Amino acid sequence: MKAWLPALLRLALVVLLVAFLTNPGWFEPLLKPLTENNAPVIYNQGSLLTLTLLHLRTVLLATLAATIVAVALAILVTRPAGAEFLPLSRSLVNIGQTFPPVAVLALAVPAVGFGEWPTLIALFLYGLLPIFENALTGLTTLPANVVEAARGAGMTGWQRLIKVELPLSAPIILGGIRLSVVIGLATATIGSTVAAKTLGEVIIAGLLSNNLAFILQGGLIVAALAVLIYDGLSAVERYAARRMGREAE
Amino acid sequence: MIEIEGITKRYDATTVVDDVSMVIEPRTVCVIVGTSGSGKTTLLRMINRLVEPTAGIIKLDGADNRSVPGYELRRSIGYAIQGHGLFPHRTVAQNIATVPVLLGWDKDRIKARVDELMTLYQLDPQAYGPRYPHELSGGQQQRVGVARALAAEPNVLLMDEPFGALDPIIRTKAQEDLLAIQKRFGTTIILVTHDMEEAVHMGDKIAVMDAGKLVQYAKPAEILANPASSFVETLVGASERPFRLLSLGRVRDAVEIGSAEGEAIPGDASQRDALAELLWSGRPALPVKGTDGKPLGRITVDGLVKRAARPA
Ligand SMILES: Nc1ncnc2c1ncn2[C@@H]1O[C@H](COP(=O)(O)OP(=O)(O)OP(=O)(O)O)[C@@H](O)[C@H]1O
Ligand SMILES: [Mg+2]
């Protein structure tokens, strides 16, 4: 009885989210009490569905780029030849994380103009650290005698990386990606302050016109996306961990 | 032939392997014994260059082992790592196929070889081939580790405590299988073990290591009879010596003329087993039969006791 309850809740959330995005009108009575003076209840300056898809696209692109760069960097600094760059790359990535995304946006706009780019840059920088740290952990905590066995079998450095080290680190790297995506989903909303098409637009519109219904629907969609994607990626991660024989960890 | 010439390995100031020289004849089994930390694994790993020596040369069939790239050298040498080291994300069949895949064998040949080895090690290819290492028992994992080392039919096989996790029955079986494979393919085997019993049983020669030095390198009978130092004597186990000496000989070589009552013992059983049987059955003598079942003579307690005594 307990086992299917979470699955049922998730399913309900998916159904609710899809229903809201495709037929927001159905939910008008629910949100009506939150508005005053006959203000519009459902966001009316664009389709919620389109905004959601654009929001997801921005996060996806930024995370993809962050994953490629972070994993490549982690691979580089865990090779004997790149070991001396470990401290340097660590601090670089840390700066990316500590720099507030809003400041990144402000700095990026003069350089690349308004639109999606400043947001992509901010999300990319913000997403690097969790993926890099996890990839580093994954690649440096591999079972020593498995890696030695790979060497003993006559694999070249490249073959060891592709056939053994990356697959065995995959679950941990996925964990980093998951964190990065969830942070990115929330952070992407502020991109709308510099004209990126994200769900932040709905929230900002609500703030400007003092419309609580807008703020709530924008926030709830982002939250629902975050929960579902977090769950989905956790499941992928567990599957990968099982496949890599690392479930005990 | 493996020629180890003045091999030394130092990590910073500590010398882990100290000026070791020895020659391992082709198609023989050389067993390395010694206490923990005496440098056995390090010496073994310098043969396939998983560890680069600080000084000295190792030649394989006359050629310096540094004359080919390390990874190529290692594909030609079987290596069963201490504690199996199976790839957890690959099935048993994929694990065994590792080196053949690296060598670019075609699919059918790989499959045939994997099936052959799994059958040899009593792992049904259908049932166990698709399993992952964590779905096997410790002993099964170890056998897969050995099968992986053997997969590409290497001429030289390095084995680091390959039978450590096996129960006595499977262990004896695995030793017999390995010796059979060794005879059939003429493999040169270098095997590290802590088990003196295993060393005496398996080794054509035994190398005893102590604190990085090779203290004795000789035939088992010689090591038992004339230990080079008190260290070797302790390692050999003074109280076990006569029995180990007997375990080296076959009953057929101790047969005396005459007959005896009771169930006959086969001529190719070890003299140690014969003594055990004599003591247990409380008889002074037992009949001996050949492989064809014909009587060869008898074996006596007195005769065996003489043979177990320190050689002059
Ligand atoms: N990479 C290394 N760096 C520094 N010291 C090392 C390294 N590898 C091994 N040693 C040291 O060398 C010594 C010999 O190690 P080795 O693994 O060869 O011993 P061993 O005889 O195989 O022991 P065991 O029977 O426990 O497996 C040990 O004291 C070990 O700590
Ligand atoms: Mg060892």
Image (cartoon, coloured by chain):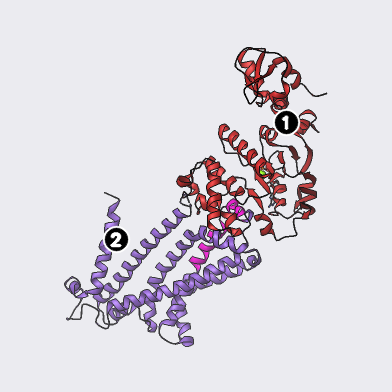
Chain colours: A purple, B red
Q: Which residues are magenta?
A: A129-150
Q: At numbered mark 1, what does the secondary structure look like: helix, strand or loop?
A: helix
Query: At 75% across and 21% down in the image, what residue appears?
Result: B307
| Front in this rendered view, residue B212 or A137 | B212
> Residue B28: in sight, yes or no?
yes
What is the C-alpha distance between the residues marked 2 and 1?
Answer: 66 Å
Q: In the displayed structure, would residue B109 be above or below residue B273?
A: below
Q: Secondary structure at mark 2?
A: helix
Q: Classify B112 as above or below A212.
A: above
Which residue is nearer to you in this view: A94 or B129?
B129
At x 75%, y 58%, the residue is B66
For residue A184, which numbered disc appears in the image?
none
Residue at the image position 24 percent from the left and 74 percent from the top:
A22
Out of B273 and A186, give the one closest to the viewer: B273
Q: Quadrant of residue B238?
A: top right
The image shows residue B57, relative to residue B160, as above or below, that is below
Dot 2 corresponds to which residue?
Answer: A10
Residue plotted at (49% across, 62% down): A173
Determine if the magenta segment contains residue A19: no
Q: Chain of mark 2?
A: A
Disc on res. B236: 1
The three-letter amino acid code for the residue at tag 2 is Arg
Q: Is residue A241 left or right of residue B13?
A: left
The kind of secondary structure the magenta stretch mainly shows is: helix
Q: Is residue A94 visible?
A: no
